[in-house]
């Protein structure tokens, strides 16, 4: 019986690898039969070689860490602002409806469209990259937190009030806990959006490092294996951050849905 469970667990763990193997196989086949010019689409072997070289002896490791740093700071700023504000707005549906248009308007506006505004205010530098990423991520987090609070199960709210809990206790012990699953959805979406904005900003807002800069610089120098290696590193970072938030969510909100 234990062997069966172990085999099933191993099969479940290996399932995500199937897509990766298929992608690499198709990539290698396309490169081998020259569907695209090999100069423009090098083999995955050349990409992995460039990735290893860049991470161990080149500047890619530094660029990777700089993007992680900017994304982390942007997420911290966004979470510190958006989570309390989302709880406040969500606790009063009338208050949220009064500012809903403004939130949805800016949430629907591409973050790249506000680059010039942030450049005028903060100039060319890390502040602009971090704050514009925080701006985009905070709106996504705020939206999810507010709706999580507003959609807290009415039976639990009513039970807390019947038991004599104060408004503050209801907010902190019931509404806040009930909103955590939706809050983590917002945080996962927020960190993905923050990473995208940071990488794009590194491409176009006077960067000297970062994965966005590495992609753009390699493309300008026509070093295609290095460009694909930087893109792969950015994708791996995004996947890793999303997986990290999922693991934290499973530990913190293990009671979700019960």
Image (cartoon, grey):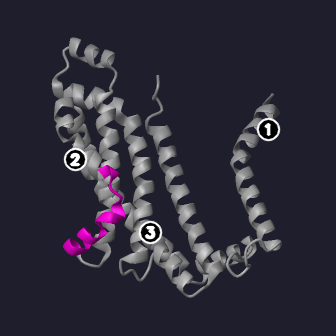
Residues marked 1 and 3 touching at CB (< 8 Å): no
At 69% from the left and 75% from the top, the residue drawn is 41
Question: Residue 224's spot in the image, x, y percent?
Answer: 63, 80
Distance from the alpha carbon under mark 2 to that under mark 3: 26 Å
Q: Which residue is mark 2?
A: 102
Question: Which x, y percent locates residue 69?
Answer: 40, 67
Residue 118 lies in the magenta stretch: yes
Residue 192 falls in image quadrant: bottom left
First to last magenta residue range: 107-122
**Does 147 appear in magenta?**
no
Q: Give left or right: position of 15 versus 176.
A: right
Q: Is residue 1 above or below residue 23?
A: above
Measuring 43% from the left and 69% from the top, which residue is drawn there?
Answer: 200
Q: Nearer the viewer, residue 125 or 200?
A: 200
Q: Nearer the viewer, residue 14 or 226?
A: 226
Residue 7 is marked as: 1
Q: Quadrant of residue 29?
A: bottom right
Q: Secondary structure at mark 2?
A: helix
Q: How many marks?
A: 3
Residue 74 can be seen in this image? yes
**Residue located farthest toward the top when viewing the structure as drawn:** 162
Identify residue for label 3: 199
Q: Is residue 156 left or right of residue 232?
A: left
Q: Secondary structure at mark 1?
A: helix
Say which element carries label 3.
helix
Do labels 2 and 1 touch, CB within 8 Å? Answer: no
Mark 2–mark 1 Cα distance, whole angstroms, equals 52 Å
Q: Position of residue 238 (x, y in %)?
A: 51, 58
| Mark closer to the chain start, 1 or 3 | 1
Q: Along the polypeptide, which appears first: circle 2 or circle 1?
A: 1
Q: From the viewer's perspective, tell me whether residue 253 is left or right of residue 215.
A: left
């Amino acid at each position: 019986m234990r062997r069966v469970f172990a085999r099933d667990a191993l099969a479940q763990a290996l399932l995500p690898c199937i897509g990766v193997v298929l992608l690499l196989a198709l990539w290698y086949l396309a490169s081998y039969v020259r569907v695209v010019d090999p100069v423009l689409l090098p083999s995955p072997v050349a990409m992995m070689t460039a990735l290893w070289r860049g991470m161990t002896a080149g500047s890619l490791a530094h660029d990777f860490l700089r993007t992680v740093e900017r994304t982390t700071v942007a997420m911290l700023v966004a979470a510190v602002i958006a989570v309390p504000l989302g709880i406040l707005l969500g606790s009063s549906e009338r208050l949220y409806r009064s500012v809903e248009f403004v939130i949805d308007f800016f949430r629907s506006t591409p973050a790249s469209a506000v680059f010039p505004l942030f450049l005028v205010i903060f100039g060319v530098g890390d502040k602009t990259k971090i704050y514009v990423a925080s701006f985009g991520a905070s709106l996504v987090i705020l939206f999810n937190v507010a709706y999580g609070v507003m959609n807290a199960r009415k039976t639990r709210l009513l039970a807390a009030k019947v038991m004599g809990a104060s408004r503050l206790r209801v907010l902190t012990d019931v509404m806040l806990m009930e909103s955590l699953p939706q809050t983590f959805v917002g945080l996962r979406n927020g960190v993905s959006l923050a990473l995208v904005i940071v990488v794009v900003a590194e491409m176009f807002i006077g960067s000297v490092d970062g994965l966005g800069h590495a992609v753009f610089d390699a493309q300008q120098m026509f070093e295609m294996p290095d460009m694909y290696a930087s893109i792969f590193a950015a994708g791996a970072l995004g996947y890793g951050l999303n997986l990290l938030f999922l693991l934290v969510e499973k530990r913190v909100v293990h009671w979700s849905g019960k």
